[in-house]
Amino acid sequence: MSNRIAEGFTMSEYFRDIGSSITTIMTGMGITLRHFFNAVKRKGGAGIDEDNYFKQVDGLATLQYPREAIPTPETGRYRLYCDINDCIGCKQCERACPIDCITIETIKVTKDDLGVCGKTSGGQQKKFWVPVFDIDIAQCMTCGICAAVCPTECLYHTQVSDFSEFRRENMIYHFGNLTKLEAEAKEKKLEEEKKAAPKPKPKPAPKAQPAEGG
Amino acid sequence: MQELGKSEQSSLRVTPQGKGRVLIEKDLSSEEMVLNMGPQHPSTHGVLRLECKTDGEVVIEAEPYLGYLHRCFEKYAETVDYPGVVPFVDRMDYLASMNNDLAYCIAVEKLLDIEIPRRVEFIRVLVSELNRIASHLVAIGTYAIDLGAFTPFLFCFRDREHLLGLLEWASGARMLYNYILIGGVAEDLPKGFIERTREFVSYFRPKAVELQKLLTENEIFVKRTRGVGMMPADVAINYGWSGPMLRGSGVEWDLRKIDGYSVYPELDFSVCVPDGKFSDIGDSLSRHLVRAMEMEESLKIIEQCLDMMPGEEGFNPRAAIPKRIRPKAGEVYGRAENPRGELGFYIQSDGKSTSPLRCKARSSCFVNLSAMKELSMGQLIPDLVAIIGSIDIVLGEVDR
Amino acid sequence: MGLLDANISKHNVLVTSVDNVMNWARLSSLWPMGFGLACCAIEMMATNASNHDLERFGIFPRSSPRQSDLMIVAGTVTMKMAERVIRLYEQMPEPRYVLSMGSCSNCGGPYWKHGYHVLKGVDKIIPVDVYVPGCPPRPESLIGGLMKIQELVRMEQIGISREEAIKKLDQKSLDPAQLIQGERKGALTT
Amino acid sequence: MNTGALLPNSFPFVMSTSLNAWSDALSELYLFGLPLGLVIIAAVPLVFIALYALTYGVYGERKISAFMQDRLGPMEVGAWGILQTLADILKLLQKEDIVNKSADKFLFVIGPGVLFVGSFLAFAVLPFGPAFIGADLNVGLFYAIGIVALEVVGILAAGWGSNNKWALYGAIRSVAQIVSYEIPAAIAILCGAMMAGTLSMQQFNLLQEGPYGFLHFFLFQNPIAWLPFIIYFIASLAETNRAPFDIPEAESELVAGYFTEYTGMKFAVIFLAEYGSMFMVSAIISIVFLGGWNSPLPNVGSLALNDWTNGPVWGAFWIIMKGFFFIFIQMWLRWTLPRLRVDQLMHLCWKVLTPFAFVAFVLIAVWEIYVK
Amino acid sequence: MEETQANAAGESAEITTAKAVWQVVRDAFGEAVSELDANPFMPFFEVLERERWRDIALFMRDDPVLLFNYMACLSGVDYPEEEKLGIVCNLESLGKHGHKIAVKVKCEREGGAIPSVAKVWKTAEWHEREAFDMYGMIFTGHPDLRRILCPEDWEGYPLRKDYEVQETYHGIKVPN
């Protein structure tokens, strides 16, 4: 121990140490005390996209979530949602998804059904029934690639983020616009049409692989 | 001050032996104990596991074990196409996704040889500097927690929340953005973003000062970190350190200056190196100081970006994104300055497929952590915690 | 079911009110084990931090599994980690709950297909009570998930096992498909 | 009605000014030959302490820390989270009580008990008023600082019995820390004893009584008294394992320190013991240096503030308030400062506090003999 | 660097320095190294006599003209059509000359061995462990060659192109 003192640990350093400890500790305590007394103020509920956002950030920062919430920006990408009425069954999203969490099965619309199948809101004629449009929300990583490639902009992320579940199965969202029975009927109809007019090559709808996560 | 630290070490029968090595004097007979720290431990910043051989409070040797978060990034990069890799790159260093994306996109763009619109470049720099501040705030905050101060951590996270709000507003997600794409950005900045960012800068400056007073200048904090985990510059380079770690050892090396990618050559900022007055060059405190100083530099860069950003008339952020990304055959090593150091991507393309043949991520944390064994030799357990904190590891990037 | 169980399951006033008080205590002081694994851990920290402050609900992170009631599996569970997850779960005292936070622990998330080293869902090794989706979930989502845990605790009583409680809650809660239908209508009208 | 009247223990005495008569009468109460009345008198402060520990200690800490950190703290459990601690305790009661297979079962079980008893035994000699004292020992102060040693035994038993490396580290650190800090703490307290010339806790209070309120307190009686005062405060932080000396339970280093393996009620007991000893050291410092149950308000001319604010109920009020004040400072320090390292802790004890304590001891002795 | 003009100028300079560097190595080691592949992205040369790789590395680190003190990256690579495995090292002279070059070393796919440079650049220690973990080539002279990311008892080398995932690991099903 004594050799250490010989190395230059002097008495003045000892007292300077004590002095600086006291002053810096006091400064720190002053800061926390200022925050303690500033606790009468609360941060406001303005969203980041509102002009007065940074005027409302003084005081307690806590947001009591289930009672109050700061709005999610409009660009927020959370729950994936498909507006199936606008879906043309092009399967671009299924291909683009880096993790294959979208499963789509399509059936070609027979000629007489084109009217029934209808048009998208953009006025485009839909040519496929989409009996299966499953999104496994539990797998989705909200990257937004699928929404970017969607030609009709029917697939998009909503701002809803709070949707936890007790069961894993509930997280597979089915958006398909046909029930199973309907889908069978349509398939049968398509077969009949193909038989009647063999000119266009019979091209059964490519079956997408089921992407069950569980 | 440093002599004081030494004298304290000597009381624990540890004497320095040359370069950072120590010898534990066996004046009392004691047994070694193997202490398993992690993978679930409050101070290992995730799932790092350290197997420490200890003699009382002294760690004789700490062997890091990785792989508890090995998420097969490189395998994934070989199976998905080039733009599809970006979300996975995000998830590597999840504290600085924008910077990760930038590094990856720079590598692929180098291979594709495409020109990027100027506004896109500014947006990229802007968001990645914002993210750099957010990342450093987490680093500083968790470092405070490691050393037992809880309040600075919460102040850091409170300010980080504003940054995340800004980035969410621009990109749509809070942490993992998928915003910087190959050849562009996903969306233009929303209206009002620039003003809000300016407000943030003026809001954050006093907060940074407060943080400095509360934490960095605190004598206990200085005592805990000064002279702990010394790393001389040449050894640091040999270990491949980069970023704040290397700058903490006194090497003025910043890829933003050295490589001058994106619009960084046009911007005025300095490379932060500790001056050795407040800290001993190469210790944990220096590394912490570099991070604290870099936040200020980032604020400067942000201000300049906001001033210099070209107008948004007729601007399409996706204009330069190639329809089908299929680079010609070749290999490339592209890199950028991450908040944790050099993040490089070695990409090998065969010119035929739309996915890389090989995509190796040279992650800065992985390399920085490799010196852990040497740094930890002969330290006390509390110092070990201080050293891990100063390396600022993100296990997602270490294990990929 | 034994005779005693049958009697208790009739829910006499005394048992239920004591049960309610006990459940109130349990749900008001859910101490989670901060089980940060990956990206979600940062969001979990953000939820604990000033802006969302889980301590409002008495949720107070403990670092030792022995003192925690709830395990928030926040992040990717890998094969190397899996055994440790089981071990930590077994170290927790009963009654214990597991909240799987984020896509990765729900089902492997982005890594479910080629992730050779990623466990495809933490529910393969330990029972999970609530799944919080998102990658990573916003702090709000995590709070929502914790509210679900509280609901579950409230529902559990003597004679009502965890599975039954989940079943009941599941029936009570909205079917996501219905929710989407409503959303779709909302989207259509606007 | 004053605030002290709201405290449950003082309620029966609010209307009465002759408290001593009440307590005398109560102490005469015997049931089946057992001194029931005496037990009640001794138990009343303890009831308060338990209440305090439950509500103020934990809840207050959470709220204070929250406000210092820009957050709200407990909000949902009861109005403003007031029932939070109650819920915690009720929950801990219901938890499974795990004892390790490899633990030393005897030590593991006895550890928290010893800790709890050790921290609460000292309350026996704490005077809460002229009449409220469990045992007015003539060596009360000596007893109070001596009984802390029991806590060390509890911690060591808990840490060793857990058979967990982290717990062992925590226990060993704690023992080293508490035993070391006993020395400056004891010397600093001795300074106070020297000024008073007694070791009896009640005598301390009586000596600091006077019409000028705080001017009679030992802290202001002697120009050097602030030195042992500060030394004892710092040492008391270390003795109760509070930040910045919380290395035995350093969360980022040792997971949870010596109580890593404890579950359920055993953990709650350890938790309560910690808050109990926090109050104990705060009470000791206020008795020795700040007049205990004496009112700090002076008589100013015709305004006899001191006389109005002295009395049995007021006494309890003042000592509790003084205790709370020091607890607030303890919390304030905890939520501001980083943690010291083990060797720095020892450095502070042996190289800073102990020499200064000796200096203070000598100076006060000189003052008491030659100046006063 | 996306500006084309600056790009062309900057990278051609890179190639010229790479050529100079390669020339120095070639002069010292002759046919042990291959010709320089002077592509604009990442100029590299291959070490043909891989037993001499460590000497070359040491030379590159210590030669006053070269001074490659910084190893930026070491990536393992699988070349299935050549039936080879290899490593690609990106070297840089940090703070000294500032030049960069990449070096490739290849070995046989089964049981191939490459001399370890962990003693030359300490950063290579973990990079080599990772390459071993992912590809299974041996690094002779490595101080501590164990798996680093995968568990010790993991089967197969995941990043090889012909890798098949094992069915179970410690009783837990691995593939989805």
Image (cartoon, coloured by chain):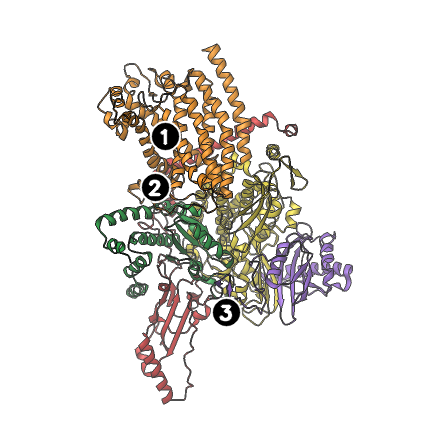
Chain colours: A red, B yellow, C green, D orange, E purple
Say left or right for D34 vs B48. left
Q: Percent from the top left, x then y, of residue A117? A: 32, 77
Question: Crowding at label 2, few (<14), some or many (≥20) Cα neighbours within 10 Å?
Answer: many
Q: In the image, which disc is placed on residue D324? A: 1
Question: Mark 2 = which residue?
Answer: D89
Q: In the image, which disc is placed on residue B323? A: 3
Q: Kindly identify the amino acid type of the residue bearing the numbered disc 2.
A: Ile
Q: Is residue B320 visible?
A: no
User: Element type at marker 3?
Assistant: loop
- For disc 3, the chain is B
Residues under labels 2 and 3: Cα distance?
62 Å
User: Element type at marker 2?
Assistant: helix
| The C terminus of chain C, quarter of image | bottom left
Q: Percent from the top left, x then y, of residue C121? A: 44, 61
Residues under labels 1 and 2: Cα distance?
22 Å
Q: Kindly identify the amino acid type of the residue bearing the numbered disc 1.
A: Phe
| The N terminus of chain C, quarter of image | bottom left
Q: Percent from the top left, x then y, of residue E76? A: 62, 62
Q: Residue at x 66, y 47 (%)?
A: B235
Tell whether label 3 touches label 2 (CB within 8 Å): no
Say left or right for D314 vs B375. left
Q: Which of the two discs, 1 and 2, sits closer to the camera? A: 2
Q: Percent from the top left, x then y, of residue B297? A: 53, 46
Tell whether label 3 touches label 1 (CB within 8 Å): no
Question: Crowding at label 3, few (<14), some or many (≥20) Cα neighbours within 10 Å?
Answer: few
- For disc 1, the chain is D
Q: Is residue E71 visible?
A: yes
